Image (cartoon, rainbow, N blue to C red):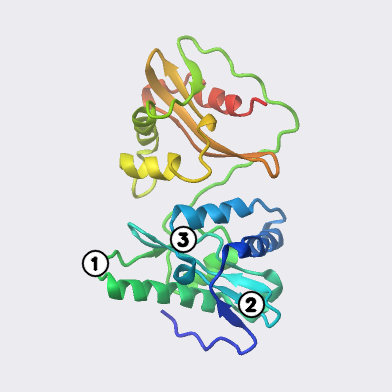
């Protein structure tokens, strides 16, 4: 942990409250726009992080403000089974990047982790993040963090309604049935993703919590491909009413079921108006 100078006297630190959600999201939006030219964060995303990870805002996050109370930066840290994870909304407003606030944000995160480990020395000693910001990746790398995985995010803007799902012999697509399909859907996902990343297997209880028991999960946006009673493919999605968009978190087809057009049909089904 690199020693950070004291916070400048014209900046202030306090705990965030729920009424700060939009102000924090506005920082993320400004940073996304400055870096990539487009934005895709909504207030609901930050609220879900706070709620799903049961973050104690009095201890697990803070905001940096200027004298008039304007929030200019936000760091948050989640306690996980694998250690600690930065809230992906950890950002500084681009108008204040010349103030070099990243060290203060990281100091809060690492200090929080150290304090927790003092009380829970058995907890895993790892800090990770899903980082989509090039400046943050560069900064964290300079502080001794390493990149373990890379992800490709694909996006399409639909100029017209996609084709309807195509008939598949012996295979149909239906909506997921709660309290009935979970085990089968989990098995398909594990089969499809078993070669990806360092932790290809996600235990059932962990997957169930992360995908179907979080705020924002819409059971009407989980589809399965079936042959008789057997599930061989699935897609898990969510929609955002704010901008009429859809985020697909997982598409999986079990190995014996591949090469039948199932994945494409699942995507076509998601896009049905």
Which dot marks residue 122?
A: 1
- 154 relative position to 206: left or right: right
Label 1 vs label 3: CA separation?
21 Å
Q: Earlier in the sequence, mark 3 or mark 2?
A: 2
Residues tagged 1 and 2 counted as in contact (Cβ below 8 A): no
Residue 126: give x, y in percent of width and height.
35, 65
Q: Which sits earlier in the primary sequence, circle 1 or circle 3?
A: 1
Quadrant in the rendering for residue 269: top right
Report the residue at 71% width, 59% height from top.
33
141 vs 162, left or right, is: left
SS at circle 2: strand
* Residue 84 in which image quadrant: bottom left
Q: Which residue is drawn at 46% across and 60% down?
A: 129
Q: Name the residue under label 2.
A: 65
3D distance between C-alphas at marks 1 and 2:
35 Å
Reading the image, the residue beneath label 3 is 129
Expressed as whole percent of the image width and height from the top left, the position of residue 177 reads: 44, 25
Q: Is residue 37 visible?
A: yes
């Amino acid at each position: 942990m690199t020693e950070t100078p004291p916070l400048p006297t014209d900046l202030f630190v306090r705990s965030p409250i729920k009424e700060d959600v939009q102000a924090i999201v506005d920082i993320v939006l400004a940073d996304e726009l400055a870096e990539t030219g487009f934005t895709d964060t909504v207030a609901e995303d930050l609220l879900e992080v706070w709620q799903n990870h049961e973050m104690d805002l009095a201890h697990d996050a803070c905001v940096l403000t200027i004298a008039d109370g304007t929030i200019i930066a936000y760091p948050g840290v989640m306690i996980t089974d694998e250690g600690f994870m930065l809230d992906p909304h950890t950002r500084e407003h681009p108008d204040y990047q010349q103030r070099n606030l990243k060290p203060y944000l990281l100091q809060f995160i690492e200090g929080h982790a150290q304090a927790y480990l003092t009380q829970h020395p058995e907890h895993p000693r790892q800090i990770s993040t899903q980082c989509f910001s090039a400046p943050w990746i560069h900064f964290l790398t300079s502080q001794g963090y390493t990149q373990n995985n890379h992800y490709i995010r694909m996006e399409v803007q639909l100029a017209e309604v996609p084709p309807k799902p195509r008939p598949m012999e012996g295979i149909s697509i239906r909506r997921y049935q709660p309290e009935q399909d979970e085990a089968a859907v989990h098995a398909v996902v594990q089969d499809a993703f078993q070669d990806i990343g360092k932790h290809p297997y996600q235990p059932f209880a962990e997957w169930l919590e992360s995908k179907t028991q979080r705020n924002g999960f819409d059971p009407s946006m989980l589809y399965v491909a079936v042959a008789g009673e057997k599930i061989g493919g699935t897609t898990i999605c969510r929609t955002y009413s704010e901008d009429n968009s859809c985020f697909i978190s997982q598409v999986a087809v079990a190995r014996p079921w591949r090469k039948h057009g199932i994945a494409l049909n699942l995507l076509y089904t998601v896009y049905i108006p």
